[in-house]
Amino acid sequence: MHIATNQNRRNFLGSSISGATALGIGAALPACFAEAASAAPKANERILVVVQMSGGNDGLNTIVPFADDHYRSARPKLAIPKNELRKISDEDGLHPSMTGIEELLQNGQFAAIRNVGYEKPNRSHFESMDIWHTCRRKDEPRGDGWLGRYLDQQPATSGGDVPALHLGQEQQPVAVASSTVRVPTVKDLAEFQLRGSDKQSLRDLLENRPPTNPSSDNDLLNFLQSSTTSAIAASQRVTDAAQGYKSKVKYPETELGNKLRVVAQLIDAGLTTRIYYVQHDGFDTHAQQAETHSVLLRQWSDAVSALIRDLNAHDHGQRVCVMTFSEFGRRVSENASEGTDHGAAGPMFLCGGGVKAGIIGKRPNLTDLQQGDLKHEYDFRQVYASVLKDWLGTDPTPILGKEYQSLPLFA
Amino acid sequence: MNDMKFADPTWAWQPFEPTADRPWDRSLVSHLYRRAGFGADLPSIEKAIDRSPADVVNELVASNREQSDFRATADALANATLAGGDPAKLSAAWVYRLLYTPNQVLEKLTLFWHGHFATGAEKVKDARMMWNQNQLLREHALGNFGDLAMKISHDPAMLIYLDSAINRKAHPNENFARELMELFCLGEGNYSEKDVLELARCFTGWEIKNKKFRKNRYQHDSKEKSVLGQSGNFDGEDGVRIVLEQPAAPKFIARKLYRFFVCDEPRPTDAMLQPLADLLREHDFEVAPVIARILGSNIFYSTNSVGRKIKSPVELVIGTLRCLNATTNTQRVAKGLRNIGQGLFYPPNVKGWDGGRAWINSSTLLGRANLVADILDSNTTRFDGKSLSEYLHTQNVRTTDQAIEHFEVCLLAVRLDEATKAQLRKTTAAHTGDKERQMRSLLHAVTSLPVCQLA
């Protein structure tokens, strides 16, 4: 696989505006380059940003059913007092940390789907994450992920841009593993290029590697060859694209904030990349949950809402949707370490200008449980199906393996 | 060689006998050193050719205790970093051991167990605790897995990492019990959710107080439990024993060792693993006999194994340095390893490193090339105390082609094709007149090639 590099239509701006970004100084772009704000962008221009909450997010303390007495009795220490919540109805409130999300909801740019899970829930982080990533169980072959299969179906993009990007320092999520496309991982924009005194000759050496011993029978070697070629190409393209971005929006100084800021940068540079994938880790709150969870939700809420505000300001608000999920929710009852153990069903979240705002799904039933955990009302693949069909404009069935009833999640 | 043979466990685990097709030559010796440890320099490889494979393997595996003088030096270095209390600095003390240990197999297995009983310093935060765990892993690395599993269940760093510093009988915390079965001993699918709950009750009252393990009998649930088909008034030690008695346990460990030493892909069949699992059971979980069996086997020296693994960051960097007798700044190496996905004492999560293809993405590939560039650009990097070109001169390297050949034997599992060699000559020729620049550029180019990421 070879990714050609092309001239970024804003490249020349990079030479006039320095690469260093000063916050708070917005540089107005010449009007001819500004995206025309269109009310309904075409499906093939829409972008999906996936935020993975790793470790198992406690959904019950994210969207809190405060009117249910069972909530308080199951969690003598961890129940959040009613007067601290951000009420969204007579029954439910958002975690106090979620000011940014509350604002998105008020602006009609946030949707939550409650009680999402799957049959026979698995309570291993790794197995459950694999199920969410591949849509397959352990006894089935699963070398690729649901987004990877989506990428396999896409025609090669005109600009030769990478069709998906993973931002972060963790290993690449299986969700974007594909049989035809090597998805780049960008750990740090500043380091995403070759260094050292021989970088030019090294680039020449690695850029178009002739295939070794005609089509090697060594799959690992073929994988390394294609990964190397695409790494060199992506490094040039992404580094060029990220030059000279200006934004008035202040992102939180957190790992997630930094990653989402880069996402906005690349979207605004006109990269034709359709899928961005980031992870937000630390949700495995077996002990001393309250403080950790509060910090993690604040980081998520602040970063995602900053991204949406920023995209709106740059006229991309209607074509980007941020989808957040976790591998499972947590046990309804707290444990003795002031934490919660692994659970089953939990909420998913969508943010952006194109979503149908509000809360979908019933109030979780805290008395009809399976092994102490919430039962699911929706299969997570129903949400995927809606995103694939109604947002990305593609047939979900071949990607998900069978037909799932989609949900009314997009306006 | 036909593929039918590769699938036959009897053939696979028989001792390897060199043949005219598969001679005991520099490339197979180099493969053994690369997989059993981190690689060897050319003189060591040449020496081993004169001995039988079994002889070399037995000597490697028998060397399971550090010599006292090396140990004293390495521990003194570690203790110096412990004074500061920063676990990130502690990584460098381990890099020192990886680079200079005479007991390569022992250190390789210490690294294996670190990935297996993965514990992360960002959560434990206490450098000495991490170091004590590292010493525990080293002490049992080529010893008994059952003993190690029992000791790790009392290990402060592990229990803190898995939120089990307090475990009360009212609502037992399931984290350690689950991971003991899922990730340490049995594998997902070989226990039920009820086993997790019941095993968690066995561990109630186990806690870490003043950085030490202790049993709080007031918090121990002393009622009857039913774990994995056995019932009784069990405590935590009983719990570990019952888990290890499961037939799934030896197979689970055998599978991980196979992947670590033989190949990343494809997954071995159960039939292929059974002889290793039997050997573990027979020897009551002694690890050394299994390692010796693997490293001396037909399958290990076959085309199903040679070049069928992706080098971990440690294998790439430490391997390159060891093969060329290099010394360098251990802090830089430690930091660099973390940057490309294998921070020592900083595994990604309790599952450790997935390895194989997961080591590779665009950032880690660029990062690997950049880390080697940094190391080669630094004047603290010396080769047997000399510059690279002087060192190669002592190894009878006079021309670019001889240098390519030297790097090929020591660093590569798969030979280079002519087209690549031609490109390498061109890269080197660009620095005519500066021998040292030439050799460093060449080494940097070779280590950045896709083929050099294979072990």
Image (cartoon, helix red, strand yellow):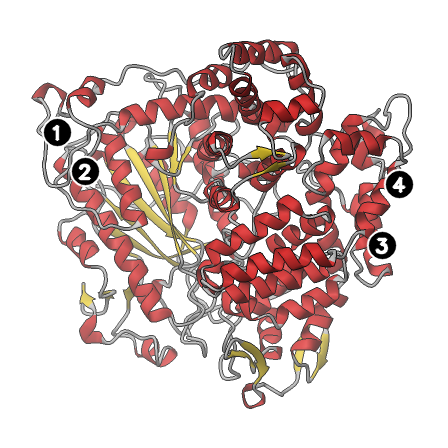
Disc 4: which residue: B54
In the rendered structure, the residue with mark 1 lies on which chain?
A
The quadrant holding residue B297 is top right
Q: Viewed as shown, does residue A294 lie left or right of A14?
A: right
User: In this rendering, which labeled residue sits more in front, label 1 or label 2?
Assistant: 2
Identified by mark 2, the residue type is: Leu
Write down the residue under mark 2: A311
What percent of the width, then of the height, locates residue B402?
68, 15
| A125 relative to A410, above or below | below
Per the model, the C-alpha gap separating discs 2 and 4 is 65 Å
Q: Please provide percent x and percent y for residue B434.
A: 51, 15
Q: What percent of the width, then of the height, locates residue A141?
A: 61, 39
Please determine if labels 3 and 1 lie on a single subunit: no
- Three-letter code for the amino acid on which mark 1 is drawn: Ala
Q: In the drawing, does residue B446 fall left or right of residue A351? A: right
Q: Which subunit holds the residue at mark 3? A: B
Q: What mark, if any, has residue B279 been given in the picture?
A: 3
User: How far is disc 1 from disc 2 in space, using C-alphas?
Assistant: 11 Å
Q: Are discs 2 and 3 located on one and the same chain?
A: no
Residue B246 lies in quadrant: bottom right
Tell me the subunit letter for badge 2. A
Instruction: Please state which amino acid type lies under the numbered disc 4.
Output: Ala
Q: CA distance from mark 4 to mark 3?
A: 18 Å
Please indicate, yes or no, whether residue B182 appears anywhere in the rendered image: no
For marks 4 and 1, give the CA distance: 73 Å
